[in-house]
Image: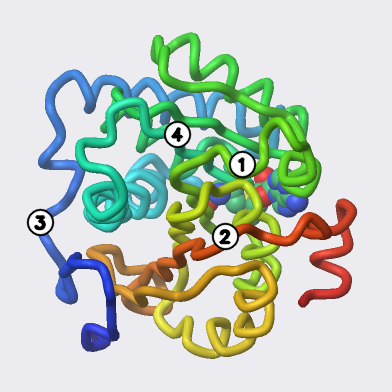
Amino acid sequence: MPRPYAYCAIGVRASSSPSSSGYSLLSAEERKQFDTYLESLFEYNAKFNLTAVKTREEAQERHIEDSLALLPVLDECVAEGQGQGKGLRVIDVGTGPGLPGIVLAVKRPHWDVTLLDSLQKRCKFLEEVKESLELKNVEVTWSRAEDVGRDAGKRGSWDLAVARAVAPLNVLCELCVPMLRVGGYLVAAKGPDPEAEVKAARNALGQLKAEVVGIIPVSSFGSHGQRTVVVIRKVGETPRKFPRQAGTPKKKPL
Ligand SMILES: C[S@@+](CC[C@H](N)C(=O)[O-])C[C@H]1O[C@@H](n2cnc3c(N)ncnc32)[C@H](O)[C@@H]1O
């Protein structure tokens, strides 16, 4: 049963009913790129342990469609934040096999997309994909999110952070918010009932200087029902003590 529109301080009104397939709306060129991506995903799956999904149809639905469903929300954040989004810096934290980052990079070639993961073998796969899809707007970074956020030359420099299936919201906020500029957004892909996670993240949000501006149902439906995104805006400078050392956010969530 689709959940009703929750609330949102940005202008987006994402779908609360199954929409026509995002895949069917792709251009021929985009479809070709996603076909190549899915071929590589299955070709390298055994070697790099990339996905539990077994069939192409499932990968299309669970990975590509689910990532495409984030785009209306991200576009709205861009419109709220700084107009057209040319040269926009986006980081996909815990990208794994490149989800949703690869999909965003294909669909928005004018955004600069950083794919960040702590597992080297996944980053090797992503370098291969970057080359085969000729994605000039993608940079692959093999690192812990905490280390990027603690790096004075990097923290505060992204406009948008996205994350899917990485950590509970209170942990995710500590990983992502320090990377954002003030006024930037974290868009976290979540399941049908993120309210408990949002509540548990209240202390983290206060300490990191960020606030939830939306909990939005999107046009993607998993086995547990309609998927949502939680949109968080950075409202002030995050204190220098965050993020804590790699591993601490997960072990001792704020
Ligand atoms: C379950 S996978 C999800 C991958 C992808 N986002 C997706 O939706 O399929 C979680 C990924 O987050 C990465 N990860 C977890 N904690 C991380 C951290 N602190 N810094 C960077 N990557 C992290 C893991 O290596 C893994 O590839």
3D distance between C-alphas at marks 2 and 1? 9 Å
Give the crowd class for mark 4: few <14, some 14-19, many >=20 residues within 10 Å. some
Label located before the other in sequence (2 or 4): 4
Q: Position of residue 49 (x, y in %)?
A: 69, 38
* Marks 3,4: beta carbons within 8 A: no
Query: Helix, strand or loop at disc 4?
Result: strand
Left or right of 49, for residue 51: left
* Marks 2,4: beta carbons within 8 A: no
**Is the residue indicated by label 1 positioned so its CB lies within 8 Å of ligand 1?**
yes
Give the crowd class for mark 3: few <14, some 14-19, many >=20 residues within 10 Å. few
Residue assigned mark 4? 89
Q: Residue placed at 56% from the left, 15% from the top?
A: 128
Residue assigned mark 1? 96
Q: Nearer the viewer, residue 101 or 86?
A: 86
* Marks 2,1: beta carbons within 8 A: yes
Query: Helix, strand or loop at disc 1?
Result: loop
Query: Label 2 is placed on what type of residue?
Result: Ala
Residue assigned mark 3? 20
Frontmost of labels 4 and 1 is: 4
Q: Residue placed at 48% from the left, 81% from the top?
A: 194
Query: Label 3 is placed on what type of residue?
Result: Ser
3D distance between C-alphas at marks 2 and 4? 21 Å
Query: Label 4 is placed on what type of residue?
Result: Arg
